[in-house]
Amino acid sequence: MKKHRVIIRKCDTYDRNRIQGIIAEAMTDLGAKPAGRILIKPNVVTANRDYIHHAYTEPAVIESMVKVLRDIPGADNITIGESGAIGMPTRMFFKESGVWDLAKRIGVPLVDFNEEETREVELPRAKWHKTLLLAKSLYEADYKIWMPKLKFHIVTDFTNALKLNIGITTHKERFCYHDDRLHEKIVDLLEIGYPDLVVTDAVTIGKGFESSPYPVHLGAMIIADDPIAADVTAAHIMNYDPEKVRFLIEARDRGYGSLDINDIEISGDITVEELADRTRGIYSPFQDLNKLDTAIKFYEGINRETGNACYGGCVCSIKGVLGTAEKRFDGNLKAARPGAIVMGYYDGDVIHPGQPVALIGKCAGVSGRLEAGKIIRFKGCPVKVADLIFFMLPRFGLKSPAADVRNTAMFLYYSLVKLMMQLAIPLRKNARISGK
């Protein structure tokens, strides 16, 4: 069996000429032959010009990819597409990250998958997502290029090629199975989101909450002809054993590929071991809530219907909200009022006399004794992030990103634009049918 290939190259800065040369040489070496309708899917999950700068694929890397494609005959039909964080308008993140201005400057269509017509496609190999609403740019693509940002992740250890597929889902379905089935959901999406080429931005990676991370310089570009090979290599670089990464185990068990790094042909001018030395010992906050420097205590329970910890649902929401609040206001968590947050149904006692206790999720509860000065319930499955930002954070004396007037104004404006674009989808579809 022919081995899949991964090429790792040194790249210390976001120099466009260097990155363009690295990508072009790697594609030639891999024998990549993009043609037809080409879709570039970067990671633009969140962005904010004031405090979120390393959550997304750098525009310089995306621009370099486009320039390489334009030098290849027949590879100039290019679209850049993404579906950003749930409930948030992707256009806002396009603008804040600089991807919007880049696309306009270089003349490449930029689409939010939530603003396109969709087609329901079947996923015969899936465990949960038996069908998926797939945006037009995705189901029409002849050649897919995934451009992830390598980061530590609060739930899945790290995020690279496979995890990037969460961003092919529209907001209508993004939270479907995003609970104790998250790892299986990721592999379900691989069936339709299997890229032809993976180009990873690993120049500056992120630690902490992946949607508002802290920067770590790694100094590399990673190019692969297969997403499993890309993620197995990334796991070793981030000092994770692929045999212990749950979504990789799931992918292997479904026959998508080997997790043995010896089954991958790795080349380049810097080794996996050298890069692993650079990430060894890095503490990535919010992966373990009880390691945070705060007076808030955390109790992780289970989903009573399944008996599993709901790591991809309410636990993920709490980590994300606290991670964003801390990134926006440094020292926020350390200044929090004492109290407790219970996620799911906790087996034991929760004793916090005179302090607030927040019960997160519709199944949240305590099997033993619950003592608190004030019990606050936030229902939902999972709980709405907006409820946590607006109403939970103040209960613990935490500053909320929602108090930022600029952020609120942007959210309202871009949400309105998103709504108008969604309402206009039938009109755009009819215009194409009539030939106008």
Image (spheres, rainbow, N blue to C red):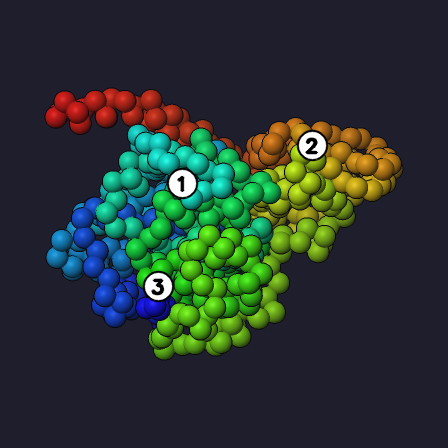
N-term mark: 3 or 1: 1
| Residue receiving disc 1 | 124
Disc number at residue 224?
3
How many numbered discs, if any? Answer: 3
Residue 325 or residue 379, whichever sits in front: 379
* Quadrant of the image occupied by residue 356: top right
Q: Is mark 3 on a helix, strand or loop?
A: strand
Residue at the spot x=55%, y=58% of the render?
Answer: 245
Residue 190 or residue 268, whichever sits in front: 190
Compared with 1, 306 (above or below) is: above
Residue at the spot x=63%, y=42% of the render?
Answer: 310
Residue at the spot x=25%, y=70% of the render?
Answer: 29
**Disc 3 and disc 2: Cα gap in Å?**
42 Å
Can see residue 161? yes
Q: Quadrant of the C terminus?
A: top left
Residue 270 in percent (x, y) is at 40, 76
Residue 182 or residue 423, whichever sits in front: 182
Give the residue type that dot 1 points to: Pro
28 relative position to 193: left or right: left
Give the residue type that dot 3 points to: Ala
Q: In which quarter of the image is the N terminus?
A: bottom left
In this rendering, the label closer to the viewer, 1 or 2: 1
Callout 1 environment at 10 Å: few (<14), some (14 to 19), or many (20+)?
few
| Residue receiving disc 2 | 363
Can see residue 8? no
271 relative position to 34: left or right: right
In this rendering, the label closer to the viewer, 3 or 1: 1
**Disc 3 and disc 1: Cα gap in Å?**
26 Å
Residue at the spot x=20%, y=59% of the render?
Answer: 33
